Amino acid sequence: MAMTDPLPVVQAEMLRHAEQLKGFIAALVADRDAAEDCFQELFLTITAKAADFTPGTDFLAWACTIARYKVLQHLERRRRHAGCLDPATIAALAADADAFHDAWGERRDALAICLERLPPAARRLIDARYVHGLAPAAIAAASGRTANGVSVALAKARDALESCIGHRLAGKGG
């Protein structure tokens, strides 16, 4: 039986969890450029260690562990750099990473389901605002509505999402 190349799986998982990993690193490194450097090093290391990852296991936990080491390496290289957390603080923050990504994963899954349940017009507004980054005034101009009307509709859509997510997380099914 031939072994499957794990690299495409690891790279797909890296892309899927990129924002979470960037956030994890940014929480540990105060400097935005240094956080980006650590993220780039993380991607290179994860690509190089792809064979060490077991598909079907918790990619995010594995990647966060590697990210923590990348941050510690960065801090060691720039030990005297002001604004960075010390290794003990990083270790304490990283200890909560599993709980963070478990809770985030549940919320992300609930959000995906709840977004699918939004009426099409509300979903288009949410996409325009949060996927495409358009301001309410720009959405209004493109749709022939008033900026205030778009803001009210967005508030209602966010309220519906919040309620749906709350119900799903409480086990009520949304």
Image (cartoon, grey):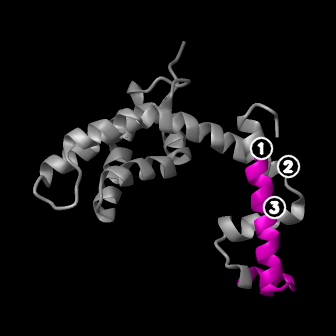
- For the residue marked with disc 3, what is the amino acid? Arg
Compared across the picture, whether 72 is left or right of 152 comes to: left
Image quarter of residue 36: bottom left
Residues 8 and 109: in front is: 109
- 171 sits left or right of 97 in the view: right
* Residue designated by label 2: 117
Mark 1 lies on residue = 113
Q: Which residue is mark 3?
A: 123
Residue 145 on image: x %, y %: 86, 84
Mark 1 residue element: helix
Q: Is residue 140 magenta?
A: yes
Residues drawn in magenta: 138-164
Circle 2 packing at 10 Å, graded few (<14), some (14-19), many (20+), is some
Q: Which SS type dominates the magenta stretch? A: helix
Q: Secondary structure at mark 2?
A: helix
Pick out the residue farthest to the left.
80
Question: Is residue 47 located in the magenta-colored stretch of the structure?
Answer: no
Where is residue 2? Give x, y as percent.
52, 17
Q: Residue at x 83, y 79 (%)?
A: 149
